[in-house]
Every structure is written in structure tokens, then in C-alpha cells.
Image (cartoon, helix red, strand yellow):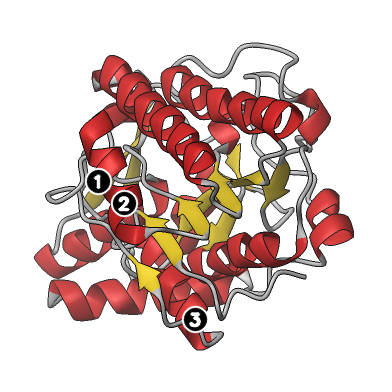
Amino acid sequence: MLDLTSKRICVTGGGGFLGSFVVERLQARGCRDIFVPRRRDYDLTTSDGVARLIAAARPEVLFHLAAVVGGIGANKDNPGLFFYENAIMGIQLIEAARRAGVEKTIVAGTICSYPKFAPVPFREEDLWNGYPEETNAPYGIAKKAMLVQCQSYREQYGMDAIFLMPVNLYGPRDNFDLHTSHVIPALIRKCLEAQSAGQPEIRVWGDGSPTREFLYVEDAAEGLITGAERYSGAEPINLGSGSEISIRDLVELIARLCGFTGGIVWETDKPNGQPRRRLDVSRAERLMGWRAATGFEPGLRQTIEWYRRHAAL
């Protein structure tokens, strides 16, 4: 087991949604030497930004969590941006970490890399058996390229780089912007704003039939750190709750927890995204001893209360 407390640790994306919880969890473990780069100081899409980061942080352990992400709308509007920036950040950073002799590199992948019609539950062995869902494909393939890089660098150079794939995340501090957010924060905001304004209905993309799996952000942070401590293998590992819910049921649940009693209008001309998502999470438990700890409804309640406080609703 790797003792992180004495290590110099760098967390790219450490000021973001997932990264901020990773930093807090590392601090709770007793880690004190944690470097969190900001994009205004270190643009990781440039070779200069990556080189200056490695020189400043001198990491022994590197968590690469920085990413350009968004919901279906943002993915449809920015396929080139999402592919290029995610790919170039990861490829340059992993190479720089190799050259610098970083002891352990943890790369956060995405379940958007799975084939559109992967058998449910998604098993890591099925990752290459088809093309990802079209709206997510540029982002998912950019991330999957980093898996190949980690595996090939392990084979050729002996680099200890692991690739962990969190499912859709939710929780406090999420992005609640209606255009760029994922489904849970978008629904929470719509329900609370409609309730506050006395609006009779909310509008939701798609027909409600797809299913999704969600992981509370603090569980994901714990999974990434547990992987850093306990796992040093070449194979990717899913991080998820292992359960799924339809978007229709999700909307009804969030509306109830928010106290919104109005109507729901389904915009069936909008894309649904991938038909189903649920992960096989047995590898994480078997190889890392990790499993999700937060129930879905308690996690949603905490997320809703956080947004109420910070949105002054």
C-alpha cells in the first residue's frame, strides 16, 4: 500500500468539482504537500504550461483530473474542443510525468468511452467492443487514448500509471449552469427555480427512457485515492454505485425532493444520449477494496440543500 502522507502530490483540476473533494480527502489523510495548479497559471493544453507545472510541483504522485466536460448540449456544440483539449492535456502531461520520473500517476477516465450498445452492466473488458455514443464520442475517445498511453508506458517504461473510470458524478459544488451542466444539477436548478417563480412546468430533454448510474462525488474522490494507495495494475477500473435509474424516474424523484409539484414537458425532439448506463463495479472491490458508500437519495438531498444555500433560493 502506497503511503501518500509523505509524498509531494499534484492534483490537476484540484480546484474543480471532483478535484476539490480529492484535495480535501488527501488533507484528511494527513497529506500536506499538495499542489493545485490553476489554468490561469498553467495552461495544460500547451507544452510550456505542462513543463512549468512539473518544474513547480515536482510531484511524486500525480492525479490528472483536469478535463473539459459538459452535458449533451455542450458535447454537441463543442466536439472538436472537447476532443482536442482533453487529449492534448492528458498526452502531454503523462509524457512529462514519465520524463520526470513521477512515482505514481492516477488518470481519471470516463464511462463515456464505452461503446454505445455495450452490454449492461458495462464490464471493463467491453471497452473496445464498439464506438461510443455519438454525442459523447470525441470526449470519450480522447480519454480512452490516455488509457492506451498509460498501458503502453507501463509496458515500455515501467511507469506506474493507473486509469480509473468514474460514472456520472453528482453532489455539492457541481456545475449548475443549464447549458453546460450534467443532468442532475440541471434538473435541481430547473425544479427549484420553477418552484420559486411559481412556474407551472419544467422542460426536460429526451423522452425519459434512458437509464443512468450516478456516483456521489465524495465516493468518487475516495475511490481515486484508494486506487492511488492500493492499485498498480494496467487494466482500467470502473468506479460506480452499480445501480441505475431511468431519467423519467430521476426527474420525478428530484422534483419530489425539491418540492416542485408542477408538470414535466418532455422535449422528445432532443437527443436521449446513450440508452443505458450501469457499471459492473466488481473489479474495484476485488482489486482495490473499494465500494460506494452514499445512498442515492441521501446524496441528492445533500446536493439540493447545498444548491439552495448557494443560490439563495
User: Which residue is at the front of the view, 148 or 202?
Assistant: 148
The picture places residue 94, in percent across and down from the top left corner, at 49, 36
Q: Nearer the viewer, residue 242 or 208?
A: 242
Looking at the rendered structure, the secondary structure element under dot 2 is helix
The residue that appears at 33% across and 64% down in the rendered structure is 261
The residue singled out by tag 1 in the image is 52
Viewed as shown, does residue 152 lie left or right of 180? Answer: right
The x, y position of residue 202, in whole percent, is: 26, 48
Q: Amino acid at mark 1?
A: Arg
- The answer to whether the residue labelled 2 contacts the one labelled 1, judged by CB atoms less than 8 Å apart, is yes
The residue singled out by tag 3 in the image is 31
| Quadrant in the rendering for residue 302 | bottom left
Front: mark 1 or 3: 1
- Classify residue 293 as left or right of residue 63: right
Which mark is first along the chain, 3 or 1?
3
The numbered dot on residue 55 is 2
Q: CA distance from mark 2 to mark 1?
A: 5 Å
Quadrant housing the C terminus: bottom left
Element type at marker 1? helix
Above or below, comparing residue 203 to residue 131 in the picture: below
Q: Are marks 3 and 2 in contact (CB under 8 Å)?
A: no
Kind of residue indicated by mark 2: Ala
| Residue 310 pos. (x, y %) | 18, 76
In the rendered structure, which amino acid carries the disc numbered 3? Cys
Label 1 to label 3: alpha-carbon separation: 23 Å
Q: CA distance from mark 3 to mark 2?
A: 20 Å
SS class of the residue under badge 3?
loop
Left/right of residue 288 with respect to residue 138 in the rendered view: right
Q: Residue at x 62, y 30 (%)?
A: 147
Q: From what the image shows, is residue 1 above or below residue 118?
A: below
Is residue 262 at all visible to an observer of this figure?
A: no
